[in-house]
Amino acid sequence: MAYKDYYDVLGVSRSSSDADIKTAYRKLAKQFHPDKNAGDAVSGEKFKEIGEAYAVLSDPEKRKVYDQFGHTGQVPPGYGSGGGFQGGDFAGFDASQFSDFFQGLFGGVGGRRPGAGGMGGAGFPGGTQVNLEDLLGGVGGTQGRRFVQNVEGELQVTLAEAFSGSDEVINVDGKRLSLRVPPGTRDGARLRLAGQGPGGGDILLTIRVLEDGRFDLDGDDLTTSAEVPAPVAALGGDITVQTLNGKGKLSVPPGSSGGQRMRLRGQGWPKKDGGRGDLYVRLNITLPKTLTDEEKELYRKLRDLRKEG
């Protein structure tokens, strides 16, 4: 199976700083976001790729593992060259190591992005199905022992999915499991699927909210930007603003300038105690790239008036 290098996916070098990686991701996420490329399967796959790449390269520990092992992930002590644990390997292998191993497979490398299943293939680009018995070398099967273990992984959701809530389906050891990501879920939130892990253990999922490229979340408040035509900035008027609820209107006062921030109350992130934060809109003043003869004449008159003043 051919894997794409995560650095190549984001168009950065291996020596790139965290800031460079974040900037590259935001630019690509904005370019290939599903809202801007509705029905475009190629853009959808590209959005998945850049989300997976950023999930790894933006995390110092995951990036370190990726730089050392590539897509194979972290291999813990006791995992032999034959591809599985041997019968006696569990004697010196504690539960925390086991959990870290599954974290690396299911959440540490690759992850899931939009529309794909989470675990049992999430850690392996291309959606490869993973059989837990194969990974455990027959523990609970050929060894005749039942091993109860909590399995930890990560589930990636878009900012819009975290905001509105989403229904997800993940694959674990050939089983399709449904779960609900509640509205207003924050990055780092934990979901538990009780009794669905190996031997009746639990599956513990850490939610990772992908950066959107259009919105920044700070506490309960969101920040975005909107383009304002120069005449509207000078004279005032209404513009259309994209929110996580859809489109809204913003009244721009006369004499507004570029970089100015305006607030839409109650259009931010859902609060734990009810209500919502605010949406801050940064104004970007725009000028037309081409002008009609009439527009040119009007701009000349405006220029001359400004000179006289």
Image (cartoon, rainbow, N blue to C red):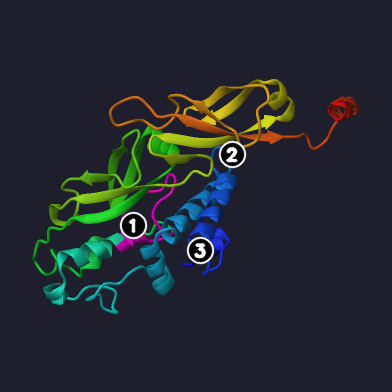
* Residue at horizontal 83 percent and vertical 35 percent from the top: 290
Residue at the far bottom in the pictured view: 81
In the rendering, which numbered label is found on residue 17?
Answer: 3
Residue 125 spot, x, y in % from top left: 43, 60
Q: Using a 10 Å C-alpha cutoff, classify the residue at mark 1 as few (fewer than 14 neighbours), some (14 to 19) or many (20 or more).
A: many
Question: In the shown orientation, is residue 261 left or right of residue 97?
Answer: right
Q: Amino acid at mark 1?
A: Gly
Q: Amino acid at mark 3?
A: Ser
Separation of marks 2 and 3 at Cα, in angstroms: 28 Å
- Of badges 1 and 3, nearer the viewer stands 3
Residue 128 spot, x, y in % from top left: 38, 59
* Residue 130 showing in the rendered view: no
* Residue at horizontal 43 percent and vertical 42 percent from the top: 158
Q: Please report the bounds of the magenta region as a residue range.
A: 104-125
SS label for mark 1: helix
Name the chief secondary structure element in magenta. loop
Residue holding disc 1: 107
Q: Amino acid at mark 2?
A: Lys
Q: Do labels 1 and 3 touch, CB within 8 Å?
A: no
- Is the C terminus in the top left, top right, bottom left or bottom right quadrant? top right
Instruction: Give the tally of numbered discs.
Output: 3
Separation of marks 1 and 3 at Cα, in angstroms: 23 Å
Question: In the shown orientation, is residue 276 left or right of residue 135?
Answer: right
| Magenta span includes 98 | no
Residue holding disc 2: 36
SS label for mark 3: loop
Label located before the other in sequence (2 or 1): 2
